[in-house]
Amino acid sequence: MKRRNRFLMDVLLGDTVVACHCPVTGRIGDLVFDGVPCLVSTTDDPRRNTAFTVEAISIDADRQWIGIHQGRVNDFVEHCLQTNVISAFPSPRHVERETVVGASRIDFKVDGVYMEVKAPLAELFVTPLPHVERRAVTRPVESERLMRHLETLIATLPETKRAVLLYVFLYDAPVFTGNPNRRHDSKIRQLIRDAIADGLEIWQVNAAISAEGIRLNSCVETTPHFK
């Protein structure tokens, strides 16, 4: 029914409006949350201020769920690595998470190769239904954060000769290359182009989320789209 602030959403469950944890502190598209269908999970963790978390939303005519819980993405990627379905690493032998590189951390180190995972939500690549209200976008903080993480990832290339930037979408998204009309995205694209020659690879995972869980749909290399 409403996004109260960065951390809370008001959701109508049955006849009662309850406070639910919002797992995204940044922007979710350009949406105004008013009557947006959602999937909600529950927890009995006594440390939580609310027993509910919004896991996914639906805004298009196909009624597909768009997963918004970015905290689950790395768990999902780790599961995919363990089950040998991430094509960038067909048969990984050693997987580390949250590896320290300088003053930063990179999400994964797989057989000596660093991989940063990003689940973009600042722009949603679906066509919202007409009744879905939208607002003008704000300053792209997410792009600035990606720039910092990307610079850290690229800094590993002299040592490893290979690094992977993995974009993950918990819905059926088109090939993602950023928005060339946005200044920050253009900078990111140029940074990526310059690093590809040194061994940076770009991959994209699309997955489907439902009440039962998350299922991998595809994993493809998208490096050629950035050249």
Image (tube, rainbow, N blue to C red):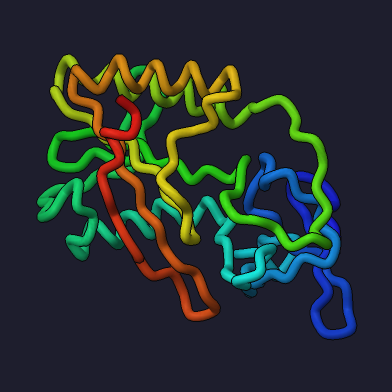
Query: Which of the 4 image quadrants contains residue 66?
Result: bottom right
Q: At which x and y percent is residue 40?
A: 66, 72
In this view, the residue in front, 36 or 81, is 36
Q: Residue at x 57, y 70 (%)?
A: 64
Q: Is residue 89 left or right of residue 59?
A: left
- Residue nearest the viewer, comparing 119 with 155: 119
Left or right: residue 195 compared with residue 35: left
Furthest residue to the bottom? 14
Query: Is 165 located above or below residue 79 in the figure?
Result: above
Side of 57 relative to 83 (left or right): right
Is residue 42 visible to the viewer in this orientation of the structure? Answer: yes
Residue 52 in the image: state x and y as whole percent: 70, 69
Task: Give the mark count.
Answer: 0
**x 56%, y 27%: residue:** 143
Q: Nearer the viewer, residue 42 or 77?
A: 77
Task: Locate the N terminus by quadrant.
Answer: bottom right
Residue at image position (17%, 28%) is 162
Q: Does the image show residue 46?
A: no
> Looking at the figure, which quarter contains the C terminus?
top left
Q: Position of residue 120 (x, y in %)?
A: 53, 43
Measuring from the top left, give residue 112's x and y in whole percent: 14, 35
User: Is the residue 196 above or below the residue 177 in the image?
Assistant: above
Residue sitting at x 45%, y 21%:
188
